[in-house]
Amino acid sequence: MRSHEETTLVSGAATAGNVVYSYTIPEGRPQQLLFGQVLLTTDATVANRRVVVGMYDAAGTLIFDSHAGAVVTASLASQHMELMQGVYRETALVNGTLQIPIPLDWIFQPSYTIRVSVSAGVAGDSHSSKLVFAAR
């Protein structure tokens, strides 16, 4: 995690496709997710994958999740998922990229968690995340 003034860059190292990456907002001020990127690399296992980004409260209850309108097939080796405010759900890959819409004011309270997961992900897949938050 790297901070500059009021923004924080959270980097999730490469994680197996069947493992959830999570980041819990530290005590202090709420944080707004401004944007992010997930790099998904698939193995040869035939299955459709979907990157899902979710907000969970301190008790682990899902409050909201978002994903693109298209899946990534195993034949596509490395794809970028861009988490962006104010975009529509994409239904097709464009130059190896899918945009995942996030709310304009997606604010996480302290002790809330953001989770990045891969639906139908397998151990041979991997995903890494870069998320940028701003203190609110």
Image: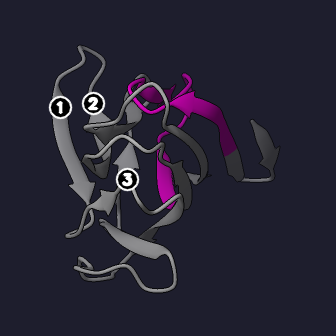
Residue 83, picture quadrant? bottom left
Task: Give the residue at mark 2.
Answer: 56
Q: Give the farthest residue toward the top.
A: 59
Kindly identify the amino acid type of the residue bearing the numbered disc 1. Answer: Leu
Q: Residue at x 37, y 79 (%)?
A: 93
- Report the predominant secondary structure element of the magenta stretch: strand
Q: Which residues are magenta?
A: 10-35
The crowding category of the residue bearing disc 1, from other C-alpha atoms within 10 Å (few below 14, some 14 to 19, many at least 20), is some
Kindly identify the amino acid type of the residue bearing the numbered disc 3. Answer: Ala
Based on the picture, tell me whether residue 106 belongs to the magenta stretch. Answer: no
| Local secondary structure at mark 1 | strand
Residue 15 in the image: above or below residue 48: above
Label whose residue precedes the other's in the sequence (1 or 2): 2
Label whose residue precedes the other's in the sequence (3 or 2): 2
Task: Give the residue at mark 3.
Answer: 74
106 or 131, which lies in front?
Answer: 131
Based on the picture, tell me whether residue 19 belongs to the magenta stretch. Answer: yes
